[in-house]
Image (spheres, rainbow, N blue to C red):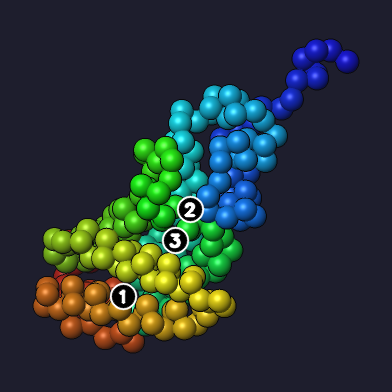
Amino acid sequence: MTRASRRPPPVTRDVIVEAAIRVLDRDGPHPSMDAFAVEAGITKPRLYRQFSDKGDLYAAIGARFADSAFAATGTDPTMLLQPPRAAIDRALADYTVGILAHPNVFRFLTQTSANREGATGQYDLASAVAGRFARRARAVAEAIPLDADGIEYLARAIVGVMIVLTDLWLDDVEPDAGQFVSRVHVLVWGMIDAYLRGRGVAADPEVPIFVTLAALNPDADDV
């Protein structure tokens, strides 16, 4: 066997992120970089060949978590074809599945930066997810078209409420997903409805938003 064939396979960023998530799931939201390295089967210096610092790794963990837990918030185009009531419930239900799969990852990403050593560059989950949601919502609004001024504020408010209430929900001994969905639904729809009414749109929660907005602009398809 040659020396080259005995070299361990390269450990990628994705492999390290997956190892870090396993550590968080198992050990809780206060990990060490040493634990991440051990779980990935590498030394800490090798870990830092893939990530420039803690903040870089935290951002990669956050991006992976956001892709899963927030997958249904603003990224699924079929949501626009559903009435708001059904669409919000579906998005929130999918969200609870992602959160309950990795509650310690959520806690890790949202705990106060000041309480963690070396938290410089901490991934801002709320800002990142709200940015995704706002871009999707702005694209939809401009396609109708609808005045999208302030859509970033709406997105940040919705995501902020979800994150704050998720933290409260996870404090329950046995978090009830159905209860979370029903309580957060009222607040999320209230914010969306207020935003639309501010633009002269009276939306029916049982009618797809796309249909409601298109009815205000019957000539939009001819443009």
Residue at 38 percent of width and 65 percent of height: 163
Q: Are marks 2 and 1 in contact (CB under 8 Å)?
A: no
Instruction: Assign the N terminus to one quadrant of the image.
Output: top right
Residue 2 position within the rendered picture, expressed as x and y whole percent measured from the top left? 84, 12
Please state which of the two labelled residues, at mark 2 or mark 1, is closer to the viewer. 2
Residue that carries the numbered disc 2 in the rendered image: 108
Mark 3–mark 2 CB contact (< 8 Å) = no
Q: Is residue 48 visible?
A: yes
In the picture, the disc for residue 188 is 1
Residue type of the residue flagged with mark 1? Val
The picture quadrant where one finds residue 143 is bottom left
Q: Secondary structure at mark 2?
A: helix
Q: Secondary structure at mark 1?
A: helix
Say left or right for 162 vs 218: right
Percent from the top left, x then y, of residue 54? 46, 36
* Residue at image location 80% in from the left, 19% down from the top: 5
Label 1: how many residues lie within 10 Å, few (<14), some (14-19) or many (20+)? some
Residue 88, picture quadrant: bottom left
Q: Is residue 50 above or below residue 109?
A: above
Q: Quadrant of residue 101?
A: bottom right
At x 41% / y 56%, what residue is drawn?
Answer: 110
- Whichever of callouts 2 and 1 sits on the residue coming sooner in the sequence is 2
Tell me the CA gap for discs 3 and 2: 16 Å
| Residue that carries the numbered disc 3 in the rendered image | 70
- How far apart marks 2 and 1 lie (CA) works out to 24 Å
* Nearest to N terminus: mark 3 or mark 2: 3
State the SS at label 3: loop
